[in-house]
């Protein structure tokens, strides 16, 4: 009989056999459920010989790095290194407004930073006489495997370079993919058995280029701060209202326009936050989420009161297609 526990036992045995008694493995983690479950499985199989790397690209959510460190490092005991490359990323993003260019810059720099870090770890383990890094962990799921085999057209291409793992394919390392036979719901179940918190298991997907593609126009540290805080308040209120799991994905976008407002007896001229929330099963089509008005009201007044530089909040009522989920 197939049970999650028997899957874990078998997979751990398989990993140990492939990696051998001295093999070292690296893998990128993001704080999302797939990379975390894959990392925890590796930790159970080979302990400290699995090296997780979290690249701080400067466009993650508010306090995200600390949260991932606590969850993966402290709580799950994964051997985790956090690389703060935020200055490098923000520097390269200066003056860039085209979303595809932002994606390319972040993707390419991510590879460079990750490879450099993997090389450092490789040197350390070799010098310590503990063997070298031969494998790269990928959190590939069964639908990704199918999609890359069947070449479903443009959507397959989009998905493959959405995935952080897909970016690292050119590294001269062999791949290890412990989740390649599982569907998303099975990964969540596996996460539960492996001791991941519900909060992490049910986390909405978050794009690799992070809030850089949710800030329309130039990505400056000041814009990052605004987008982050607005998003944080939005998600907090969604959770408080008990709606987080009903929604497939939600975020706040920062628009590159200014609108007139009034405060006391003065006019203001500040930015606009657009709230996005969708329901979907496959992210290929999506409906906008029907919020109760009182929740929208709370979110709007909190963002306008608490986020300096924003005087207007709007709700995006566009479905996909023709609108995409990201702006
Ligand atoms: P769209 O905007 O195409 O989004 O409707 C569909 C899903 O893909 C995610 N997405 C990305 N993920 N890098 C990623 O890792 C990207 O560049 C990217 N663009 C979109 C989006 O968040 C949604 O879940």
Image (cartoon, rainbow, N blue to C red):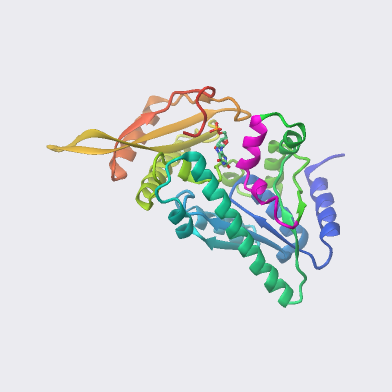
Residue 80 visible to an observer of this rendering: no
Residue 95 visible to an observer of this rendering: yes
Q: Residue at x 71, y 66 (%)?
A: 48
Q: Is residue 162 magenta?
A: yes
Residue 320 percent across, percent down from the top left: 53, 24
Query: Is 64 in front, or is 115?
Result: 115
Label the magenta part by its dominant secondary structure: helix
For the record, the magenta segment spans 154-173
Residue 178 percent across, percent down from the top left: 76, 48
Q: Report whether 174 appears left or right of 262.
A: right
Image quarter for ligand 1: top right
Quadrant for residue 284, please give it.
Answer: top right
Query: Is 192 in front, or is 308?
Result: 308
49 versus 312 height, above or below: below
Q: Quadrant of the N terminus?
A: top right
Q: Is residue 282 magenta?
A: no
43 versus 291 height, above or below: below
Residue 179 percent across, percent down from the top left: 74, 45
Query: Is 219 in front, or is 43?
Result: 219
| Number of disc labels | 0
Q: Report whether 64 appears left or right of 150.
A: left
Q: Residue at x 74, y 57 (%)?
A: 172
Q: Residue at x 39, y 48 (%)?
A: 95
Residue 238 percent across, percent down from the top left: 45, 36
Q: Report whether 85 appears left or right of 47.
A: left
Quadrant for residue 111, please give it.
Answer: bottom right
Q: Residue at x 48, y 31 (%)?
A: 277
């Amino acid at each position: 009989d197939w049970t999650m526990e028997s899957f874990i036992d078998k997979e751990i045995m398989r990993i140990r056999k492939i990696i051998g008694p001295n093999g070292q493995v690296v893998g990128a983690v993001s704080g999302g459920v797939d990379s975390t479950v894959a990392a925890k499985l590796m930790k159970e199989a080979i302990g400290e010989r699995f090296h997780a790397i979290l690249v701080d690209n400067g466009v993650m959510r508010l306090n995200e790095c600390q949260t991932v460190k606590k969850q993966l490092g402290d709580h799950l005991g994964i051997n985790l290194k956090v690389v703060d490359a935020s200055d490098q990323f923000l520097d390269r993003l200066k003056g860039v407004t085209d979303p595809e260019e932002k994606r390319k810059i972040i993707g390419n720099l991510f590879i460079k930073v990750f490879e450099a870090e993997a090389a450092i770890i490789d040197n350390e383990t070799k010098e310590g006489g503990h063997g070298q890094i031969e494998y790269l962990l990928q959190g590939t799921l069964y639908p990704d495997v199918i999609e890359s085999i069947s070449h479903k057209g443009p959507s397959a291409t989009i998905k493959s370079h959405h995935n952080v793992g897909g970016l690292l394919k050119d590294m001269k390392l062999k791949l290890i993919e412990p989740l390649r036979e599982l569907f998303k719901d099975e990964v969540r179940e596996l996460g539960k058995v492996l001791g991941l918190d519900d909060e992490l298991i049910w986390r909405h997907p978050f794009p690799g280029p992070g809030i850089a593609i949710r800030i329309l126009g130039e990505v400056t540290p000041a814009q990052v701060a605004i987008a982050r805080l607005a998003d944080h308040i939005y998600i907090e209120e969604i959770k408080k209202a008990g709606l987080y799991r009903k929604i497939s994905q939600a975020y706040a976008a920062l628009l590159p326009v200014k609108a007139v407002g009034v405060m006391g007896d003065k006019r203001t001229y500040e930015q606009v936050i657009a709230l996005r929330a969708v329901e979907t099963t496959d992210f290929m089509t999506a409906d906008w989420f029907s919020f109760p008005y009182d929740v929208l009201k709370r979110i709007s007044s909190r963002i306008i009161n608490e986020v300096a530089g924003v005087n207007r909040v709007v709700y995006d009522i566009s479905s996909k297609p023709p609108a995409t989920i990201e702006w």
